[in-house]
Image: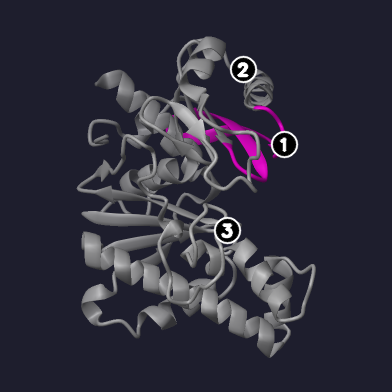
Amino acid sequence: MIMQTVSRAALTGFAADLGGTKTAAVRIENGKVVAHRVLTTDPNASPEAHIAAIGDELAQLGYNTNAPLGVAVAGRVDRAGAWHAVNRGTLSTIENFPLAQALNARFGDATCLNDAAAAALAEGVFGAGRHSDSFAYLTVSTGIGGGLVIGNRLLSSANGLAGHIGFVSSRFASGPCGCGRMATVESIAGGRGIAAAAAAAGFENMDARAVFAAAKGGQDWADRIIVTSAAAVAALIGDLTAILGLDTVAMGGSIGLAPEYIERVQNALNAEPELFRPDLVHVKLGHDGPLIGALAAHLRKETM
């Protein structure tokens, strides 16, 4: 979808972002979030319950049926609008659910897409990649996701898998990934992978936040895990650059935005030949990225 005809100032409407941890709903006026609501996502809720929760939050923001609405969700959304959980550990009940149909029945008209793809679209057109010709958005959080904006166009595929870059193989990994593949970037570099590495090192029941705290406190075992995570992400950036000729990569997510993490990734990326080292920057739109991108995708659809 090409976004050249939609300016950020033209973005007025509503958006929701359903993630594995939280669900946010916002009202956007002239490209800016002016009202915001958030609730904890129930990973075991049915798809219908998720939609009902989004509806309740939107109602609190003044949403009226048929107002412009974009919805970003964790998982894979295919071109037919069906919703699939790629990692069953995040949303356990999602399997080939007709999300676009259900949203249109509930809200009158809405556009749905993957949350990382929505963030990539927003960052690529309005944020960190707005001057880029070949841009990648990379979120490092519980898992690893992303999106690709090439020539101002968000890359998509009929099966909805385009942009799920965390499922690329990694030479730093050896264990299983929640997507069903073995030895992926997500399995070693994402939050679950970091926790698994800590457990393998003899430190049970530690999440990524605790591992980062231990590394900051001078624990060598924890520092090695974070260094490996950053090296895997840097190698992924090099691989994507070899394939797509990237000039800019923007990093977000709770781990991607953690203190000094991007510097660790940059240090590892510096070992790559210069040709495979795109500019590496933080995201510009923060947590609003998927929401802005979701509404932008909806408004672009209306003008086609």
> Tag 3, which secondary structure?
loop
Q: Earlier in the sequence, mark 2 or mark 1?
A: 1
Residue occupied by mark 3: 141
Residue at coordinates 29% horizontally, 31% vertically from top-left?
6
Q: Nearer the viewer, mark 3 or mark 2?
A: 3
Q: In the image, what residue type sits under mark 2?
A: Gly
Residue occupied by mark 1: 44
Residue 136: x, y in percent? 34, 56
Q: Residues within 10 Å of mark 3 (few under 14, many from 20)?
A: many
Would you say 285 lies left or right of 238 here? right
Residue contact between numbered discs 1 and 3, judged by CB atoms under 8 Å: no
Q: In the image, what residue type sits under mark 3?
A: Ser
Residue at coordinates 32% horizontally, 50% vertically from top-left?
148
**Image quarter in which the C terminus is found:** top left
Q: Is residue 132 visible?
A: no
Q: Quadrant of residue 242?
A: bottom left
Residue 266: x, y in percent? 41, 77
Q: Residues within 10 Å of mark 2 (few under 14, many from 20)?
A: few
Residue occupied by mark 2: 62
